[in-house]
Image (spheres, rainbow, N blue to C red):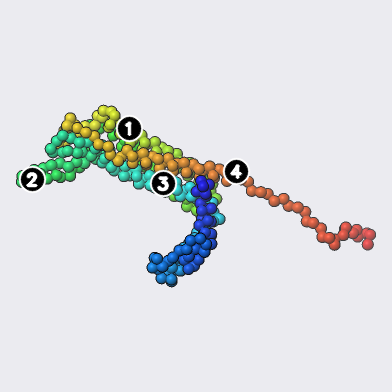
């Protein structure tokens, strides 16, 4: 079962021949259970067109990719997809304002959402005798008492996103080169090695940032404090909430690690193919015909 899942080429072949062997153009199975298209209320013409399109799509995919090394291409596509997904999650992680969610015993500001670069809260105002909550934003700048985990976390997040952006460029270029069958194995190996190394570095930066902030916030004593112009003080803090940042960061780091493993497998497969030497064909002297006799000397004639 695991071997079947690891072989996309076998999967394509089985899908193609399964559809061609078991489905008739009328929309019913030739053996086993019967499929009644009337339950779906499809006209016969629509049903035949639908099955013809599926058959042509499977056949075209088989003809186009059946002769290629789908295992290698599948790894590269999945690795690049996970890299793009991790990059998107990393951007949302850096822009999140829920790295710290603090509750305060105050009638003015009850909850403060603190991110790496910005804080968000609802402040209550009394307007004509009515209490109105107004969203407020505050930049985390020099007026704040910035803790070490926030300060270094900003740099680590910027580094992780920059490295992941470079990986996306290198991975896309390598995939295009592999797709057009350009004979540049050294270039592909270099792209995959750099991508795997950068992904591991980005994974480390992400895991360190979220783990450090989570540990200090819940199990340590952070030095982060508000500026003097802030409507409340830190001494009014009563509870800290668990947010989605830590699970999101661990998920992002896991995707980065999986992408690095897939790019490393691609490098190993390129090395294995480069070790295979072409077989040299030995040239044999021409064989004389059956009717050909021994050479005759001119003097003997």
In this rendering, the label closer to the viewer, 3 or 4: 3
User: Which numbered dot is residue 275?
Assistant: 4
Label 4 vs 1, first from the N-terminus: 1
* Residue at image mark 1: 212
Q: At numbered mark 2, what does the secondary structure look like: helix, strand or loop? A: strand
Q: CA distance from mark 2 to mark 4?
A: 79 Å
Label 1 vs 3, first from the N-terminus: 3
Residue extending farthest to the top is 221
In this rendering, the label closer to the viewer, 2 or 4: 2
Q: CA distance from mark 2 to mark 1?
A: 42 Å
Q: At numbered mark 3, what does the secondary structure look like: helix, strand or loop? A: helix
Q: Are marks 1 and 3 in contact (CB under 8 Å)?
A: no
Q: At numbered mark 4, what does the secondary structure look like: helix, strand or loop? A: helix
Q: CA distance from mark 1 to mark 3?
A: 24 Å
Q: Position of residue 56 (x, y in %)?
A: 49, 64
In this rendering, the label closer to the viewer, 2 or 1: 2
Q: Tell me which residue sits at (53%, 53%) in the image.
A: 10
Q: Tell me which residue sits at (52%, 64%) in the image.
A: 30
Label 3 vs 2, first from the N-terminus: 3
Q: At numbered mark 1, what does the secondary structure look like: helix, strand or loop? A: helix
Q: Tell me which residue sits at (8%, 43%) in the image.
A: 126
Whether residue 158 is visible, yes or no, is no
Q: CA distance from mark 4 to mark 1?
A: 45 Å
Label 3 vs 4, first from the N-terminus: 3
Label 2 vs 4, first from the N-terminus: 2
Q: Position of residue 244 (x, y in %)?
A: 30, 41
* Residue at image mark 2: 130
């Amino acid at each position: 079962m695991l071997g079947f899942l690891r072989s996309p080429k076998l999967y394509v072949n089985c899908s193609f021949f399964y559809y061609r062997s078991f489905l008739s153009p009328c929309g019913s199975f030739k053996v086993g259970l019967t499929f009644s298209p009337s339950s779906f209320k499809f006209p016969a013409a629509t049903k035949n067109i639908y099955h013809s399109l599926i058959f042509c799509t499977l056949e075209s995919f088989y003809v186009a990719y059946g002769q290629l090394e789908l295992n290698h291409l599948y790894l590269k596509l999945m690795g690049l997809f996970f890299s793009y997904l991790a990059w998107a999650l990393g951007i949302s992680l850096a822009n999140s304002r829920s790295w710290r969610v603090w509750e305060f015993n105050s009638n003015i500001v009850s909850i403060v959402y603190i991110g790496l670069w910005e804080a968000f809260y609802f402040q209550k105002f009394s307007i004509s005798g009515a209490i109105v909550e107004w969203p407020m934003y505050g930049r985390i700048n020099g007026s704040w008492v910035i803790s070490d985990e926030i300060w270094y976390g900003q740099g680590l997040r910027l580094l992780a996103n920059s490295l992941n952006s470079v990986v996306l460029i290198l991975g896309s270029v390598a995939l295009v080169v592999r797709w057009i069958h350009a004979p540049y194995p050294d270039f592909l190996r270099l792209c995959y090695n750099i991508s795997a190394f950068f992904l591991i570095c980005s994974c480390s930066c992400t895991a360190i940032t979220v783990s450090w902030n989570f540990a200090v916030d819940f199990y340590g004593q952070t030095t982060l404090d508000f500026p003097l112009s802030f409507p409340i003080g830190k001494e009014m803090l009563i509870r800290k909430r668990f947010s989605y940042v830590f699970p999101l960061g661990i998920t992002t780091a896991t995707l980065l690690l999986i992408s690095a493993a897939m790019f490393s497998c691609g490098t190993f497969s390129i090395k294995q193919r480069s070790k295979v030497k072409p077989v040299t064909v030995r040239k044999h002297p021409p064989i004389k015909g059956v009717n050909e006799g021994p050479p005759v000397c001119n003097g003997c004639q």
